[in-house]
Amino acid sequence: HMKDYDASERIGQLAILLLERFQSRKYISFVHCCVFGCIRGWNGHIKMSIEPLLSGYQIGMQTGDIQLAMSNAYWYLADNFISGQLHLAALKKRLEVFGEQMVEYKQMVFHHLLRPIEQVVSNLLFSTGEPLLLIGRDKEQETILIKAIEQNNSYLAVQMFIFGCVEAYIYGDYELAVNFVQKRHELGRKITYKRGYYGMTDFFDGLSFLAMAHQSSDQKWILSANESISNIDHFAKVSPSNCEHMLLLLQAEMKSVTGEVEEASSKYELAISAAERNEFIHEQAIANERAAEFFLRNGDSSRAAHHYGEAQSLFLRWGAQRKVDD
């Protein structure tokens, strides 16, 4: 609640030092889960947490601490998705392997939390010839969601709303995206712990609000977007390597909505280079796509074509074949 990132980082570092000092294997899984699953991503690049989480999982399995092992595995997979570090095909395989293991060891909480991530990854990866079923438009997911809400499992419902929003936004279904954000806010009143996913949640909230602001003159979208921008601004000060590109893209979109063409143009370019510098390939793709739409709206078709081309090639490098085909 206090959001004292520096203090939590110092305590985390102390925990890691004590582990090394006393060579205590039985606490590794616990410490890695706390430090690399909850703290380190707010203070350094998310990718730096990925390997320690995998080792937290492996050691937890060896020491018989199954629940902690699976918690490490969950964060390992979530961080790989959020950071875009792993090609989606490789991520899908790992999601399947860990998912099966979670069922085998009856760790159903983590298994359920992985389902929305798995669905988004599958929907981005390739075209099966079947019509695309986004989380909010899929009967099976709808059933899981209704059940989660009935059973008062707000965490699972919130998880579906978060990743459902990401997926809907990427596929341009902005009304569905903001519908997920609003439902999440309604449920969020029952939950004390908010899952920010190192800025990803506020980032896609803000992008969805701004997409609606492009389509409607209702001021509520601008007000909601400003709230997301203010949160990301705070995160970017704490963890620039994770959030700098997010802030720049949200600012670019806001400038575009308010008609500040030169400032918007410059912010889009800065957002793209920050995403590239910090290796967020999927968000670099999104920044290029938004820039392309901006230049098209403003009559610069050659720059628009350049950015559309960049977006497509970056989405393909991430593994989002179906997004490109669409």
Image (cartoon, grey):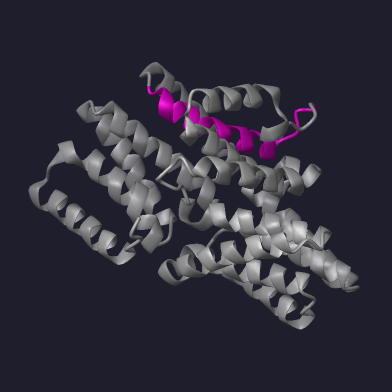
Residue ID at (80%, 28%): 129
Instruction: Tell me if I can see residue 285 in this picture.
Output: no
Residue 325 seen by the camera: yes
The percent coordinates of residue 133 (x first, y second) are: 73, 31
Indicate yes or no whether the magenta region holds residue 25: no
| Spot occupied by residue 159 in the image (x, y as percentages of width and height) | 53, 38
Q: Is residue 102 above or below residue 91?
A: above
Looking at the figure, which quarter contains the N terminus?
bottom left
Q: Nearer the viewer, residue 53 or 259?
A: 259
Q: Main secondary structure of the magenta part?
A: helix
The range drawn in magenta is: 107-129
Quarter residue 138 falls in: top right
Task: For the C terminus, give its image quadrant.
Answer: top right
Q: Residue at x 49, y 44 (%)?
A: 189
Query: Going 66% across and 33% down the picture, which residue do you hit?
Result: 135
The quadrant where residue 262 appears: bottom right
Residue 309 as seen in the image, left or right of residue 275: right
